[in-house]
């Protein structure tokens, strides 16, 4: 069962409808029988590994995983080292370097080192709205009830009663804005960074500097977005 990979610090306190995990697991396994799905089996919940609910300082939420060969590895907008950057990641890098006025540090060339694991280690939860997708078909798993699971994950983060910045990129992610009502929460919504929408307000939104300003205002260390 894919939820065997769910870390205990997340799985224990999640409030989920009865039978939800079993229903998602069954649906995903059926999809995998009928074709290639992304990310590879066992990596669906990678975003929840290595970070605990009370350690999350920033949430970055997108739509669903990359659907190209070898791209998705379980963290939103991230790719494994050595995998060419998808267009959305290229646009995130453009915005980060412009916003922070610093060079992107994770690359040997422009087609390497797009793994955002350093962000996760710094307290950034990289979570998509839907956690699997059929290869080559964006949005193909929106009917598998993933949103109920990721919504419960975000509810758990929201309940921690601590300063938090929530970056919601694209309409599916923005549906979760209602979960964050604590005055300590800063919710920043922008279009998805894909080439289809990045020029409609993602570019110039300055999410990285705004996130750090909020964290510092509330006595927390900023995220070292350009660190390794």
Image (cartoon, helix red, strand yellow):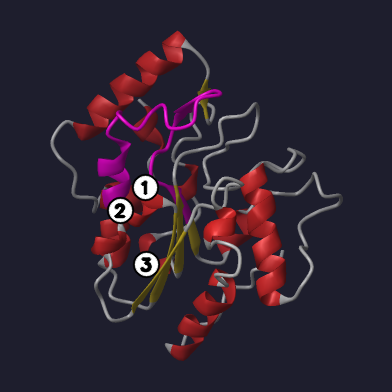
Q: Which residue is mark 2?
A: 175
Q: Secondary structure at mark 2?
A: loop
Q: Assess disc 3: are there few (<14), some (14-19) or many (≥20) residues with their C-alpha within 10 Å of its C-alpha.
A: some
Left or right, 212 with respect to 80, comes to left
Q: Which residues are magenta?
A: 126-151
> Neighbour class for label 2 at 10 Å: few (<14), some, many (≥20)?
few
Farthest right residue in view: 109
Whole-Å distance between the Cαs marked 3 and 1?
24 Å
222 left or right of 164 in image: right
Q: Residue at x 72, y 64 (%)?
A: 228
146 is within the stretch colored magenta: yes
Give the class, few, some or many, for how many residues have Cα within 10 Å of label 1's Cα (few <14, many ≥20): some
Taking the image as drawn, is residue 147 in sight? yes
Task: Calculate the distance from the C-alpha at mark 1 to the C-alpha at mark 2.
Answer: 5 Å
Q: Which dot marks residue 54?
A: 3
Q: Position of residue 77 (x, y in %)?
A: 57, 48
Residue 223 included in the magenta stretch of the image: no
Residue that mark 1 sits on: 172
Residues at marks 3 and 2, CA–CA distance in whole angstroms = 23 Å
């Amino acid at each position: 069962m894919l939820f065997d990979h769910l870390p205990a610090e997340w799985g224990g306190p999640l409030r989920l409808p009865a039978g939800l995990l079993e229903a998602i697991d069954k649906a995903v396994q059926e999809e995998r029988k009928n074709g290639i799905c992304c990310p590879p089996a066992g990596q669906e919940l990678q975003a929840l590994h290595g970070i605990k609910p009370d350690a999350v300082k920033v949430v970055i939420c997108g739509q669903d995983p990359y659907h190209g060969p070898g791209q998705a590895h379980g963290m939103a907008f991230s790719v494994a080292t050595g995998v060419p950057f998808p267009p959305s990641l290229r646009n995130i890098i453009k915005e980060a370097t412009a916003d922070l006025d610093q060079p992107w540090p994770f690359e040997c060339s422009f087609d390497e080192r797009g793994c955002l694991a350093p962000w996760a280690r710094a307290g950034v939860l990289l979570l998509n709205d839907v956690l699997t997708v059929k290869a080559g078909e964006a949005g193909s798993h929106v009917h598998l009830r993933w949103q109920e699971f990721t919504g419960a994950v975000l509810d758990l983060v929201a309940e921690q009663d601590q300063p938090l910045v929530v970056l919601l990129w694209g309409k599916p992610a923005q549906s979760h804005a209602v979960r964050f009502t604590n005055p300590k929460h800063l919710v920043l919504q922008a279009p998805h960074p894909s080439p289809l929408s990045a020029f409609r307000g993602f570019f110039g939104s300055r999410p990285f500097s705004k996130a750090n300003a909020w964290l510092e205002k509330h006595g927390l260390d900023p995220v070292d977005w350009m660190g390794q």
